[in-house]
Every structure is written in structure tokens, then in C-alpha cells.
Image (cartoon, rainbow, N blue to C red):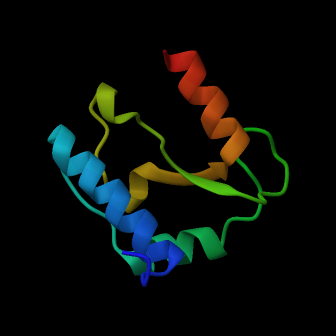
Amino acid sequence: MSHLDIFERRTYANNWRCKKKGVIGQITKEELKNLVENTSICSHCNKNIEKWSIDHKIPLRKGGFNIILNIQIICHNCNRDKERKDE
């Protein structure tokens, strides 16, 4: 899969993970690319995003869907911290 660009890889990985969990919906490469290109500030820490992560606003484990309206782009550090808090 190394020939795929970052948006294709992230979209594929996200959709695969959600499908495996039985979550409804999927996002497209174009939707993800558009969201990332239009997001420069992390909604959690309000800092410029250098390394981005896909975050589901309503977590999948709480019934959130894998659709673009439920996805936000946050910085990698905030996503990692959020995962730790959820453990």
C-alpha cells in the first residue's frame, strides 16, 4: 500500500477500522483531504496543527457514525491525550 498518498492511506485505515467494528458509514479521500486542507487550528488545544489525526466527534464506542459530519481534524498530541483519558 506504499504507493498510496497520505489521504488514501488514512481514509482506507479509518474505514477499515470502522467496518471491522461494525460502525455505519465511510468517508472518502476527497472529503478527508478537503477537511484537512481547511483545518489549520486544533479544536482541542487551539494551536496550529503540524501533525494531524482523524477524530470522531461522537466516539464510535458511544454510537458515533463514520461520516464526514462526525469527523474533525485535531493535532496528534491531543488525539493521543484523548485516547489515554478514554482508557
Residue at image location 55% in from the left, 69% down from the top: 35
Determine the residue positioned at 48% across, 15% down.
87
Q: Can you tell which quarter of the image residue 29 is in?
A: bottom left
Residue farthest to the front, as pictured: 2
Residue 86 against residue 69 in the figure, above or below: above
Q: Is residue 23 visible?
A: no
Residue 50 sits in quarter: bottom right
Left or right, 77 with reference to 21: right
**Side (left or right) of 76 relative to 35:** right
Residue 83, picture quadrant: top right
In what quadrant of the picture does the N terminus appear? bottom left
Where is residue 47 shown, x and y percent of the image? 85, 49
Point out residue 48 in the picture as x, y percentages from the top left corner. 84, 57
Question: What residue occupies the far right of the structure in this picture?
Answer: 47
Count all numbered tags in the image, as a single digit.
0
Residue located farthest toward the bottom when viewing the structure as drawn: 3
Residue 54 drawn at (x, y percent): 51, 52
Question: On the picture, is 82 further left or further right than 50?
Answer: left
- Residue 86 showing in the rendered view: yes
Residue 84 lies, with reference to residue 54, above or below; the image says above
Q: Nearer the viewer, residue 79 or 34?
A: 79
State the residue at coordinates (49%, 81%). Answer: 5
Q: Give percent across and percent down for residue 13.
A: 36, 58
Horizontal side of 57 relative to 11 (left or right) equals right
Please tell me which residue is depicted at 62% across the width and 34% down the height of the picture: 80
